[in-house]
Image (cartoon, coloured by chain):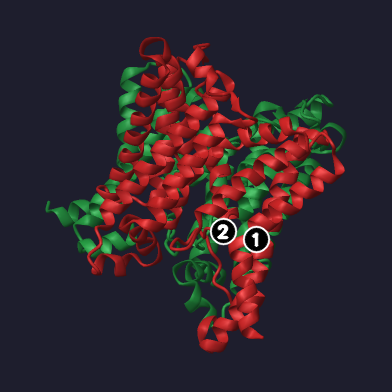
Chain colours: A red, B green
Amino acid sequence: MKKALSKSGLIGERAGIFIMLAVLVILFAVINPDFRKVNNISNILLQCTPIGIAAIGMTFAIISGAFDLSVGSTMALTASVTVSLIGVLGFYGAAAAGLTLGFLLGLINGLIVTKVRIQPFIATLGTLWVYRAFAYIYTQNKPVQSTDAVFTSWGNSFAYVPLLFIVMLFCYLAGFFLLYSTPFGRYVFAVGSNRKAAILSGINVAGVTLLVFAMAGLFSAMGGIALAVRLWSAKADTASGYELMIIAAVVLGGTTLKGGRGTLAGTFGAAILFAVIYNAMDMFQVQSYWQKIALGGILLIALSLDGLRRKYMILPIEQAQNPLKNKGELISEK
Amino acid sequence: MNQQQFWKIWERFGLFIVIIIGIIGLSLSSPNFATLTNFKNFINQAAVVAIAGAGMTLAITSGGFDLSVGSVFALAACFGAKTLIESPVLQSIAVSLAIGTGIGLLNGLIITKLKVPTFIVTLAMMTIVRGAALIYTKGRDINIITEPAREAAYKFFGGGYIFSLPVPMVLMIAVFVVVYVILNHTAFGRHICAVGSNEQAAIYSGLNVDRVKIAVFAIVGLTTAIAAVIQTSQLMGVNSGTSGLGFELQVIAVVVLGGTSLKGGKARLFGTMAGAILVAIANNGLNLHNTPIFYQYLVFGIILLLAVSMDGLKNKFYTPAWAWAQRV
């Protein structure tokens, strides 16, 4: 019985987000004929790309026990720089410049965390404002636009599959490879679950942290550019508040904020889930104010279920193995 | 003076020294800085952030933090403003404070009873409460236009004087004294520190950790609502969409700037007040020199990073590298 419980708990953890996604998609598709149109599905896949791509880097960061609050600002700054450089360098040159900039901004975050030794939360809270201010100063608070043919063509679809979504899939493939098939990925998990043990076993913890932040910057830049492609423009206040949305997607996907545990597939599912919910709320003409309430409510319900599942399914098993453990209480997570 | 002495002095007075340097610098560079009206301007600005910061200091000391304060700020202001148009001043303030405390309680209950991470609960509440504020006002601005006597009475909280001291400043000091007494001279204050430094140990020693946390979040809501009343009284109006937007991160930054550790267990209450005053002075100086508003973000971010870097460097001298890496 206990074994069965623990098994179902584990399945809930791995597949919960996809079950929820499937249930919602089927529900919406049955209720609303407009929802199941191919064009709309294609639209959802397009909508999920900026957050979906940026969330890859965040998943790495959170699994390694770190945190990046500056991603929204990084998205705005890199998107603004990319769009403004298209006229000079062409789209690919500008995108390369934007990605390099994102990588560097992430590297700066990483250096502040590892060399000056500031907690990630505070370090990236500081750079959140600094990068946002750079975006304002760079654009002088005016929107930057471009109608370059190559730039806008990336917003098109290939047989109903948006090109940006294909880019996102490749990003996730790269992420899967890095996280599950390289020593670096193992180190990310090791650093996140027990930093001291990781140091004592000879892992270059500072190096791993630095690389994780650089990746978060790089993927944010890519997400920012994806957003710019969708809108054909960028502004200094683009993507403000996205950092919290992205963290929410990662956590909803089953990655714990404590670090050491998490799945990239869950993040992928959560990013699509967000887009599905937004899309459905537009379909059902939910007022934008109520959308905020619904989104917060869904986040709360999903994670309450997770909290209750831990309390009633996982904790009893852990206690049976170790009666002293937690004395019937779960230590809450930050 | 050897290094150890230097860091000791820095830890106690560093922020105050920076504030004094800032005041001297700005007085020299701008003739309008050292005037009474300007003093009132920046102390009013500082009081709003500092009062919410007092509650947040408790939350961070107990090992959590609250991302919903910006939205709670907006909702308390909206309800207060709308109530004021039809009812007496005291009723309006009571409504604001009740809203703030109520949402704080709700945060605490969800965190402790449903076992959802604090970060997620307060993040979700941030969007929910903002949505509620927008629905309540139908997305429109509220301008407080009512009987002149009532308007004057309400304006007292944001712009009045008690013994020729600005009321927001008096309120700020009062809130800090109360929170100081709670933190240092009551069992509840000890419990907050205990929960923040080692939750497991607190459970084993028989503390009702849930109750401590719920009370802390209620206090955060209450102080946020007080801040909202002050600002609403200064502006005599509120916009449900933009009021308090980004306030949560500002408040957390000010608390951290003051030296309270995000790891919990260690409060630097008056550091929070000093941090709020420092940020207000910096913003005020930028305004006097006519810089665009977004330079304030830049300066704010840099002040935060510099302050915590000094802290980081200080600790580097005392702790071995591996213990450090653990802490980061």
**Viewer-closest of B99 and B226:** B99
Same chain for marks 1 and 2? yes
Query: Is B206 situated left or right of A39 in this image?
Result: left
Mark 1 lies on a secondary structure that is: helix
Chain identity of mark 2: A
**Viewer-closest of A131 and A182:** A182
Identity of the residue drawn at 62% across and 52% down: B122
Residue B253, x across and y down, in percent: 46, 44
Q: Label 2 sits on what residue type?
A: Gly
Contact flag, marks 1 and 2 (Cβ < 8 Å): yes
Mark 1 or 2: in front is 1
- Up the image or down, A330 lies above or below A126; here it is below
- Up the image or down, B224 lies above or below A220; here it is below
**Viewer-closest of B238 and B176:** B238
**Viewer-closest of A97 and B237:** A97
Q: Which residue is disc 2 drawn over?
A: A254
Q: Which residue is disc 1 drawn over?
A: A16
